[in-house]
Amino acid sequence: MIADLDQLEGSNQTELEKNGEHFEFNAPVTEAVSIGNTVVVGFGDGKIRFFKPDQKPHDIQAHSGVILCMVKAEDYILTGGDDGRFLQISMDGDIEEIANFGSRWVDSVAAYKGDRVCSSDKVVYLWSKENEKKSFTHQSTISGVTFSPNGKHLAVSRYGGVTVWRRGKNKWSSSNYSWKGSHGKVTFSPNGKYLVTSMQENQLHGWRLNDKADLAMSGYPAKIKSFNWVGDTPYLVTSGASEAVCWPFDGKEGPMGRKPVCVASGGKQYATFVESLTEENAVFVGFKDGLVLLSEIDEKKNSITIRNSTGSEVSAIVVSETRAHILIGDVKGNVTWSSIRPQQN
Amino acid sequence: MENSQQVPVTVLTGFLGAGKTTLLNRILTEQHGRKYAVIVNEFGEQGIDNDLVVDADEEVFEMNNGCICCTVRGDLIRILSGLMKRADKLDAIIVETTGLADPAPVAQTFFVDEDVADRTKLDAIVTVADAVHLSSQLEDHHEAEEQIAFADVLLLNKVDLVDDSALTRVKERIRKINPFAKIIQTTRCDAPLDEVVGLNAFSLERVLEVEPDFLESDHDHEHDDDVTSVSFVSDTPLDMDKFQTWFGDLLRTKGQDILRSKGILDFQGEEERYVFQGVHMLMDASPMGSWAEGKKRSSRIVFIGRNLDSMNLEEGFENCKIG
């Protein structure tokens, strides 16, 4: 597929620029996820738009303010907004309000096989498949929640570290993973052995789940706004530098004492968004000036320009689950939607 | 780094009961048609009349940049980044701090965090002080002193509840800590709002307007912890290299004790005025146009902080003169 994608690069205009559809929506793109062949996009004005192949995008007014977070929950998406609402939305655009916290923002959402989770203020709320509601209170406002790949753990990032909740037979028990500072989003490695947060400082912090060994991943010139797991190694691909910085998480020690692989250089500007093409061990990298590159996680390979600079910071890149389309969104509300299947002539 | 896309931010400090909420509600209700976001603290006073009120946590953390006093507010960065995703542009943001908060991490957040600095700019630090209780608060809480020291505008509220001699004493006390803030006397925070918001007090241009009330440093304070201020003037031009070495070293080693610094400098061989303004170890500096025709060129520098006596500031400044 990479070989085919080579064809996307034109001399001046890229294939994506020529063949893609371009939209201006006048509200920042804040979140985007894919379900099947559809990409669902959240905006700063509370609208959700559905992009489906060969159809005009349609929108619904989901929130009255910024859509702060969005996650796929089987055939639905869950969203949280600065209007205090936690919503479940179907692919047809039917909205079900799960909870309403009034003036308190819903900062993060997560899902695992029927379990639906959101955080508002210092509390994580969990609605089980059976619609039983639980809540977990923390010492400070929560900035990220995520389930481990097997659903046994729920990680909650906050000021001073992460609280990991372990699912027991009858109750959940918690364990603290501490590291001084303000933590942002949190992620588990695909094998569930590592836990990583992006920090308000220009660094990532990680822990090995079983012994809480610390991993410091620093040296970034800017904040890490986006990360994603790629390939079988796997690599944690991150924004926040002039290239995509990819940390290897194979072996017993993961990235400890090892150098990251750096690919897709954007020159002097910094990467702001990364999206994985995991089967290809490749990554799409979006930059502060709108440039989007594609590169394999291999420093010997050259990157491909998918889109040239537009002047506006990339805030979302999503490849559809069917791997047929790509959507690029930016902070000014511009969206590019394009097929990434090679054109048959 | 100034552009019209930056939303101005007013930081509102002051002890509990001084009248912060009264002032806040006046700003929100009397400035019709303007869209404000208000960031309050969970321990703050209730009853704020605005659609967009966000709770903050006071997550102070140290930046890992070698600057020991460079603390910023993680919660503020997160909230501001959320507000910047809105489709409608805000006219201004007001950050209300708790009575016991140190204003430095709030102010420093606007200097240090790149995304915050890109999208917002600190307009002014406005401190509301209670004319009746300020003296005792200054004795009991060093935070009160810091709030006075950091202020660009100081609303001395409830002046109707003290007599003239008490009012004079409290003003003298304020002036000793911070002779550069604009003091507005009020009874129910009834200050003209255009003297409180939209000031651009943190712009370097405003430093040029600094006219300290007095120019001698004061030495009669009781204990070393007191916040005081000093200022120096020189009609002899300064040597830029010497100044940069001295000032850089000073902020690096004593920045923790220097709460605010400001200055207008006349460097030998430079046509333009150099202007700077700092909070602890962080500062902003740039050339700011030529000197006025026919007016004498001179350098002026002011410091507000603790233990200023121990820093040999006068000697350091003298040594920067040419010759």
Image (cartoon, coloured by chain):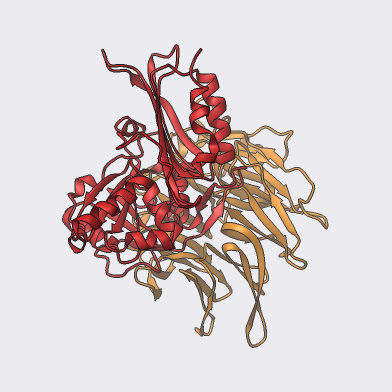
Q: Position of residue B216 (x, y in %)?
A: 37, 35
The part of the image, by quadrant, that contains residue A242 is top right
The front one of A280 and B288 is B288
Residue A100 in view of the camera: yes
Which quadrant of the figure contains the C terminus of chain A? top right
Q: Is residue B309 left or right of residue B195?
A: right
Quarter of the rendering occupied by the N terminus of chain A: top right
The chain painted orange is A
Residue in view at x 31 percent, y 70 percent: B46
Q: Is residue B16 above or below residue B271?
A: below
User: Which color is chain B depicted in?
Assistant: red
Counting from the top left corner in percent of width and height, residue A256 is at 78, 51
Residue at image location 56% in from the left, 40% down from the top: B254
Asked whether the viewer can see residue A62, the reply is no
The residue closer to the viewer here, A144 or A152, is A144
Q: Residue at x 51, y 57 (%)?
A: A33
Above-or-below relation of A243 to B59: above
Q: Nearer the viewer, residue B294 or A33?
A: B294
> Outermost residue, bottom direction?
A170
**Residue furthest toward the front?**
B220
Along the viewing direction, whichever of A284 and B90 lies nearer the viewer:
B90
Relative horizontal placement of residue A97, taking residue B198 as reference (left or right)? right
> How many numbered callouts?
0
**Position of residue B67 measured from the top left corner of the image (x, y, whole percent):** 59, 43
In the image: residue A25, left or right of residue A274:
left
Residue at x 51% of width, y 12% of height: B323
Query: How far across and how far down the image is residue A120, in percent?
Result: 45, 69
